[in-house]
Image: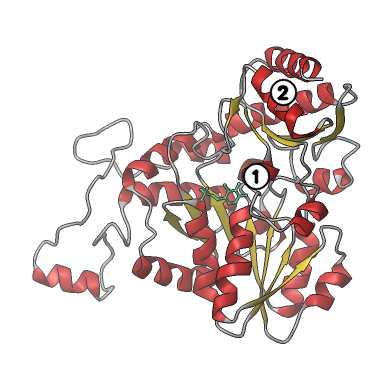
Amino acid sequence: MKDITKSIKIQTERTQHGEHSTPMFLTSSFTFEDAGHGKALFNNEVEGNIYSRYSNPSVQEFIDKVCMLEGLEVGFATASGMAAVFAGFAAHLESGDHIISSKALFGSAHQIITQILSKWGITHTYLEVSATEEDWNNAVQENTKMLYCETPSNPGLDLVDLEMLGKVAKKHDLIYYIDNCFATPVIQKPAQFGADLIVHSATKFMDGQGRVMGGIIVGTPERMEKVTFFCRHTGPALSPFNAWVLSKSLETLHLRVEKHCENAGKLAEALQGLEGVTKVNYPFLDSHPQSALAKKQMKSGGALVTIDLEGGFERIIRFTKLLTIPSKTSNLGDTRTTITNPNTTTHSKIAQDIKDELGITEGLMRISVGLEDIDDLIADFKQAIQGSK
Ligand SMILES: *Cc1c(COP(=O)(O)O)cnc(C)c1O
């Protein structure tokens, strides 16, 4: 069976009621047949659910689907994407360890690496987006334990060569940890390049409709053992209600992501060259400096487009006032097109020198292209760009 069919067919075992749609297991704990069964469950002698901080059938259904989509065996679902990102770090890194990452990272990931891990004596090296295989190899120290990257990155849409990173990780026996949120497993599968831990903000395309928060980390059994232990005992567990919503949404993930990408490609092309737009950034545009790499490791260009508008923040205010279709919000991955100014929102707390290097300018607008009619969207963007001059 293909992934699309499996996304629909994977389902919690039917109960005696023969329900068609998958049920929602809103229960904090599970009963034992008798004290002996309870003892056996706690001793791992029999399989079964004990307590929803550890596992829950609705949550497991969501995990099973993401493991299938990413081609990895074990997962743990969390209340938000950041809880999953953090769990991957905290479960593996110890005081004295070192991690290497590309500079192009989601704002909160930066905060974890620079403000939280550093408190525990975990050091890091940030590499330029343009770093070569040699640069990555040279950055490895005796105490390096992990490579962490996001590709494409939020909001710069910078790419990291997953195959190259896989070689570096293998050569130095490092944990290879990827945030695959922007691409989704529909268009990019990092495990094919050797990634052994993959994290997602399920809040974005997996939900796809801006309703619930969630996160998930999946990996090989070896890499997930410590993560599962960490999560079971520190309690970032995903709510079964949210898991049910997310699992249902995965049934349409392929359909939605393909349409998102088609619309994003068309919008990017239409905005190129408009007066006042100094730059349009989209991985599959020929003008993207890494378009060849994008075409090598991604099936399509993704749903995110960024543009640079000239005229300063006052122009941005006028422009967003005139836009009628997109929601002005920091979320992304929604049926509705969303738009935000990263410099003053998602990345406002990032040091100015890093912002400069990542191209997070005053006029940068991050657009998550939705599923509206593309002609309506293009017309709306054109009138708002024109009218805000
Ligand atoms: C949103 C996002 C996260 C964080 O996810 P939350 O669900 O908001 O905690 C992590 N990585 C990327 C790339 C994101 O876009």
Image quarter (top left, top right, bottom left or bottom right) of the N terminus: top right
- Of residue 362 and residue 142, the one placed in the foreground of this image is 362
Residue linked to disc 2: 319
Q: Dot 2, how many residues are within 10 Å of its Cα: few (below 14), some (14-19), or many (20+)?
A: some
- The answer to whether residue 195 is seen in the rendering is yes
Residue 250, horizontal then vertical, whole percent: 49, 38
Is residue 114 left or right of 235 when viewed as pictured?
Answer: right
Q: Is residue 14 left or right of residue 294?
A: left
Q: Amino acid at mark 1?
A: Phe
Disc 2 Cβ-to-ligand 1 distance below 8 Å = no
Residue 51: give x, y in percent of width and height: 25, 60
* Between 115 and 185, the one nearer to me in the picture: 115
Label 2 secondary element: helix
In the figure, 185 relative to 135: above or below?
above
Residue at image location 38% in from the left, 44% down from the top: 243
Secondary structure of the residue carrying tag 1 is: loop
Q: Which residue is at 73% across, 19% downward?
A: 381
Read off the residue under disc 1. 182
Residue 300 image position (x, y, % from top left): 74, 37
Q: Mark yes or no: residue 1 visible.
A: no
Q: Position of residue 205 (x, y in %)?
A: 56, 38
Q: Residues within 10 Å of mark 1 (few under 14, many from 20)?
A: many
Task: Residue 220: name its quadrant.
Answer: bottom right
133 up-or-down from 82: above or below: below
Q: Which amino acid is tagged 2?
A: Phe
Q: Residue furthest left?
A: 34
Report if the beta carbon of the residue with label 1 is closer than 8 angstroms to ligand 1: yes
Q: Residue at x 87, y 41 (%)?
A: 288
| Residue 321 numbered mark, or none | none
